Image (cartoon, helix red, strand yellow):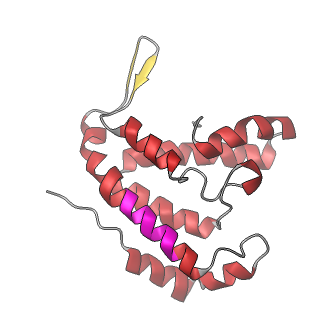
Amino acid sequence: MAVYKAPLKDIQFVLNEVLDVSSLAKLPGYEDATPDTIQAILEEAAKLCENVLFPLNRSGDEEGCTYENGTVRTPKGFKEAYKQFCEGGWTATTNDPAYGGQGLPATVGFAITEMITAANQSFGMYPGLSHGAYEALARHGSEALKKLYLPKLTDGTWSGT
């Protein structure tokens, strides 16, 4: 049986030795993004990817999504995994705290996304598309649109395409 093991040592090497992630905590708004905090977040993301997302990889590949009579159905386990993903705050990692996000640096978000897509590419498209919609609205949307959409995209209630 195949196993996914998140490459935390490799990710930490890149973040600490190549990118000097400790310098992020010196930037305004990222004071809490210390190496220890980032390490703890990545360890939790790895657990989610290894124990929840990777085991669903097969159902995602074999079943895919279906659309019938106006209803989209996801592969077995995806609905429950998405609920757990949202409840864990994984939809909000790099989003603006003003809209319910955690405000983590994009670098941390990229590391998390790497693990998600390596563990389960089909599941990874769900938050990936929402992240794109969030960024488009955050950068170019009116204040009214931001107020309406960004909190729902941040908590995972709504998703983007």
x, y (%) of residue 120? 35, 51
x, y (%) of residue 77? 32, 38
Residue 118, can we see it?
no
x, y (%) of residue 61? 28, 41
* Position of 128 relative to 5 (above/below): above
Residue 129 appears left or right of 104:
left
Would you identify the image quadrant in which residue 47 lies?
bottom left
| Residue for point 63% across, 84% down | 22
**What residue span does the magenta drawing correspond to?**
39-48
* 41 drawn magenta: yes
* Position of 33 relative to 138 (above/below): below
* 81 drawn magenta: no
Residue 70 appears left or right of 4:
right
Residue 109, can we see it?
yes
Would you identify the image quadrant in which residue 157 lies?
top right
Residue 90 appears left or right of 22:
left
Main secondary structure type of the part rendered in magenta: helix
| Residue for point 78% across, 41% down | 146
Would you identify the image quadrant in which residue 33 lies?
bottom right
